[in-house]
Image (cartoon, rainbow, N blue to C red):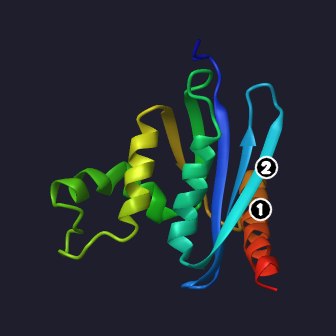
Amino acid sequence: MVNTNFYVELWTDGACKGNPGIGGWGVFLRWPDGSEDKFYGGENNTTNNRMELLAVINALKSINYYEYNNVKLYTDSQYVMNGITKWIDNWKKRGWRTSSGGMVKNKDLWEILHALVNFYNISWNWIKGHSSNYGNNIADELANLGVESVRSKDV
């Protein structure tokens, strides 16, 4: 049964050393009972925007929407925030083209994210990065751990 009285809080962040370069994503999750989870990952030869998208995708995938479908999601990425709340419907109408006619970058991830958001009641919140927001600072640290995890595999 879905618990509609409580929110799962998610802070997400992406990082990239070089753009493209080695990237990482991080998720800090706070459950309604106050317990917390932290996880991260990374990739070679990627971009910061891909890592920002993967952070949100992996955050949403970590929640069982049959138990919790109310989500407060915090991101410092205007790209993710505007893309999913303002731009995506028009991109789809135009055959995944931007308003200037170019192809939408990261279409594969946008399609995944668009499918995922339909399972949740999401309150989207943009926060300024590196501004002493507790959850965002943790997500940023985790994203950088994602970068380091990829670097350590390259050794």
Amino acid bearing label 2: Lys
Quadrant assignment for the N terminus: top right
**Front residue (pair 31, 136):** 31
Query: Which residue reaches farthest top?
Result: 1
For disc 1, the marked residue is: 142
Dot 1 and dot 2 residues touching (CB under 8 Å): yes
Looking at the image, is 149 positioned above or below residue 75? Answer: below
How many numbered markers are drawn? Answer: 2
Query: What numbered label is drawn on residue 79?
Result: none
Q: Is residue 126 visible?
A: no
- Write the residue at 45% across / 49% down: 113
Q: Is residue 124 left or right of residue 67?
A: left
Q: Is residue 102 left or right of residue 126?
A: left
- Write the residue at 71% across / 57% down: 136
**Front residue (pair 8, 22):** 22
Amino acid bearing label 1: Leu
* Dot placed on the residue nearer the N-terminal end, 1 or 2: 2
Looking at the image, is 55 positioned above or below residue 154? Answer: above
Quadrant assignment for the C terminus: bottom right
Expressed as whole percent of the image width and height from the top left, the position of residue 69 reads 55, 27
Q: Is residue 106 visible?
A: yes
Expressed as whole percent of the image width and height from the top left, the position of residue 48 reads 56, 74
* Mark 1 surroundings: few (<14), some (14-19) or many (≥20) residues within 10 A: many
Q: Label 1 vs label 2: CA separation? A: 7 Å
- Write the residue at 56% across / 59% down: 54
Question: Residue 115 occupies which quadrant of the picture?
Answer: top left
Question: Residue 34 occupies which quadrant of the picture?
Answer: top right
For disc 2, the marked residue is: 38
Q: Is residue 104 left or right of residue 10?
A: left
* Mark 2 surroundings: few (<14), some (14-19) or many (≥20) residues within 10 A: some
Q: Secondary structure at mark 2?
A: strand
